[in-house]
Structures are given as C-alpha cells and as structure tokens.
Image (cartoon, grey):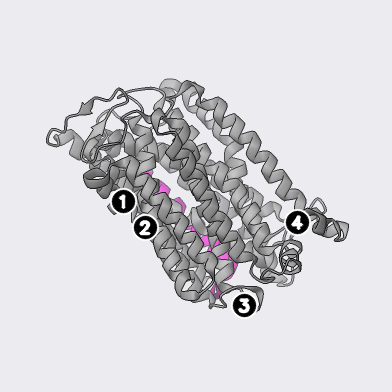
Amino acid sequence: MNLLPLALQADSVTFTSFTPLLVAVALWVGFVIYGLFSLRNHPKGLNPLFFTEMWERFSYYGMRALLLLYMTAPASAGGLGLSLKLSGLLYGLYTFFVYALSVPGGWIADRFLGYRKAVLVGGVLIALGEFALASGPLALFYVGLAVIAIGTGLLKTNCTSIVGMLYEKNDPRQDGGYTIYYMGINIGALIAPLILGFMAQDPVFVAALGKLGLASANGWRWAFGFAGLAMVAGLIQYSLRQGSLGDVGLKPGARLSANGEQIIHAPLSPEERSRMWVVVILVFFIMIFFFVFEQAGTTLNLFADEHTRMSLFGFTLRSTWFQSVNSIWLLFLAPIFSWLWIALKEKEPSSPIKFTLGLFFVGAGMLLLVLPSLAYTANPVLKVSPWWLVGTYGLHTIGELCLSPVGLSTVSKLAPARYSGVMMGVFFFAIGMGNMLAGLAGGFSGSLQPATLFGGLFAITTAMALVLVALTPRIKRMMGGVH
C-alpha cells in the first residue's frame, strides 16, 4: 500500500522529513549511472561484482547505522533496551567478526568452494541473517548477527578477490578498477542509512504502520527486513550475470586469469615471502585507521544522536542519516583522487605514504570535533551545528581514499596467487579489529568527556602516522618493486 498519502495528511514540517529520502534516491540513481559509465573501459565481469557489493554494503551499512541505537532503545520504542556498555560490546564483537571471518572465508574459497560459489553462499546467509533480525525475538537477534558475520566473511573477501583476478599482471587499469568497485560499496552505503534510518525512526512512517494495523513501534524490524531484501536483489543479478565472468574464480585451489588459463603455483620465493610480510605490517596500521574511522557507528553516532542539532536548512534530520555523509563525500571525491594518482605519474606517492596520509586525515577529523565538544562541556544543554560532523566526515573520507581502495589494490598485487583469498581476508581482519576497538570505545565513551575522547583519538593516529613514516623506506624495499 502506498504510504505517501498518509504522509501528506501530516503537517508540512513533518512532511519535509521525506525530502532527504527523495534526495537519497536521486543521488543513488545519479551515481549508479555514473558507475555504469565508468565501467565501460574495464572487464565486463566488474559490472556484476560492482552491483553485488553495492547491495551487500546497503545491507551492512544500513544495519550498522541502526544497530547501536536499536539495542539501546527502550522496548516501548521497539528496541531491545540493553545497556550502553553491553550494546557497545555486542557492536564491537559483531563488527569484528564480520571482518575477521574473512580469513576463514578466503581459505574456504581457496581450498574448497571456489571464489564465485563462496560469494553466492555468503549472500544467502546474509539475507537469512537480516530476516532473523527482523523477526524480533532476542534469541534470533543473536543468531541473525552470527549468520550475517559468517556470510559477510564469505562474500566480501572473495568478491573483492575476484576483482583482482579480472586483470592480467601489470594491467594499469587495476587500481582504477578497484576505485570503481569502491564506488559501488559507497553507493550502497550512501542510501542505506537514509532509507533504513527513515523506516526505523521517522514518526510519520512508524505511525503509518500503526494505521495499517502493523506493529507501530517496530520500524526497526521493517528496516532489517528491507536490508535482507536488498541482499536478495544483489544475489539475483549476480546469479543471472555469471557469463560475464568467464572462468574467473570458479575453481578452488587454483587461480584462473581473465583468459581462462590456470596460474601454476610454484613454492613461495623469498621475494613473495617478503611481500607477504609487508601485508602483515600494513595490517597493523589499517587496524589503527579503522579503529578511529569506525567511530562513525559508535561515538560519532552517539554524538549525532545526543549533542547535534537535528535540523539543516529547515529540514528535520535523523541521527542515522549522518552515516551517509561519508559516502556522499566519497562519491564526489573518488573521481578526483582517481585522476590525481594518474596525473602524478612517477611522482605518485607509494602505498605506505598513502597509508600515512590516511592516518593523518582521520586524526584531523577527530581534532575538528574537539572545539564543539569543549563548547558542549561548558554548556551541556547545547546542541552543536551538524556542519561539525559534516566536516569531520569530509576529512575522514580523504583519509579513507588514501588508504582503503589503495589497500585493496596493494594486497591484491602483493599476495601470491594461491593465497589471494586468505591475504585479502587478512586485510579485512584488520578492519574487523578496528571495528571491535571502536565498539569498545563506544561502550565506555559515557565515562569520558567528548573533547578528551576525540583529542585522544587524534593523538593516537598522529603518533602511528609518524611511526609509519619512519618505517616507509624499509617497507618499500620489502615490496620488491610493487608500487
């Protein structure tokens, strides 16, 4: 049934809450068209992988925006009514295992399922997990989280590995291919918090559910169910478009190139071992980066919910919508960075230096919030401008573009062929560790003043960036010519 007429019966101020939703859909259509245009000069197989990852990330980021707020919301508002400390712990463990299970997920694909079948099985598990969350009972909530984590470990690792397999060795298009693939991630991440946050939190939508005889306090569950349907949509298009992938990623225990030839696995050479150690070293700094970056789902989410003014240009905002700001920034900045790395040519910074820049910028984003946090401390009833968070997410996005897609491409280049799934899993394991630390920080954030918390995060990332600068000459030698 169309809910729009019910919304039109509300006053005009309430109706404006639909405007960001319509803007989100318009942005989504625009960026999908742009993504399709960008795919023209790349292997055909990148297209179904782009959309599979887009819908998987819609499911994940939409749920991530809701999860902590859903767990801490009282039962009268449709939530679970859990304490902040327990909710932070559960959030941290969940987001850790979502990424940490990428290691066994990659190993299973390398040895048993093959990469493409692992993606399909993972997607089915994710959809089932989302539907378990939507069902409501606490026991199924925990089961749903576990099933989603297992499914993501299978899908995300191996979908990303297949992207690298589409390109021949030394293909100059590979970094660009990963940047386009990363756009797919963020198209899904852009619209998910806006749409699912609207379904979970908007009073007009929730009231409309009640008028239709549906659970008036459980917009949360409708949002989880819609996330599951998004994953189903991704699986359908992935299954129907297998032909465009050729033989890439079909067989376990063997990597097939884009022309269908099997790459023979010789014993690891000293150079390959050295490159694997580079991945291990960079994983530590990736973890630190995402420990701060993933505050978006914990402390920054709470800062938006509790200390930020929920209005902009006369529109009423929802705290979950701030989770889309990073993706909006990224989709505008990604083409600039893609052009910049190519334009620099031989002056393009090495991967370790790009990682260093990522750490500096994510720390700068936290430093930006210290000033409004001091103002809030002096006047606890103060609600600060939403532009502070917009600026923080802008700096975080610059850092992300320096580190995350570059990291995916670097791991793909450094990993020996028969370990591509496992080594990509190690990359995501580092992200999982960062998420777990972010969850723990969110659980204990109530005992710290925001200015102290954000200032401490800035100090940690700055110190780690300086350490990486010192290690860069040694790391470049160990990379053996890989840029």
Which mark is first along the chain, 3 or 1? Answer: 3
Which mark is first along the chain, 2 or 3? Answer: 3
Q: Left or right? Give the position of 43 relative to 26.
A: left
The amino acid type found where label 1 is placed reads Gly
Q: Left or right? Give the position of 62 relative to 253.
A: right
Q: Nearer the viewer, mark 4 or mark 3?
A: 4
The amino acid type found where label 2 is placed reads Ile
Disc 4 packing (10 Å; few <14; some 14–19; many ≥20): few
Q: Residue at x 61, y 35 (%)?
A: 31
Q: Residue furthest left?
A: 267
Q: Position of residue 182 (x, y in %)?
A: 48, 38
In front of the other: 300 or 165: 165
Which mark is first along the chain, 3 or 4? Answer: 4
In front of the other: 324 or 430: 324
Image quadrant for the N terminus? bottom right
The local secondary structure at tag 4 comes to loop
Which mark is first along the chain, 1 or 4? Answer: 4
Disc 1 packing (10 Å; few <14; some 14–19; many ≥20): many
The local secondary structure at tag 1 comes to helix
The local secondary structure at tag 3 comes to loop
Q: Nearer the viewer, mark 4 or mark 1?
A: 4
Is 385 magenta? The answer is no
Q: Is residue 131 above or below residue 472?
A: below
- Find residue 150 and name its label: 2
> Where does label 3 land, which residue?
74
> Where does label 1 land, which residue?
105
CA separation, marks 1 and 2?
A: 8 Å
CA separation, marks 4 and 3?
A: 26 Å
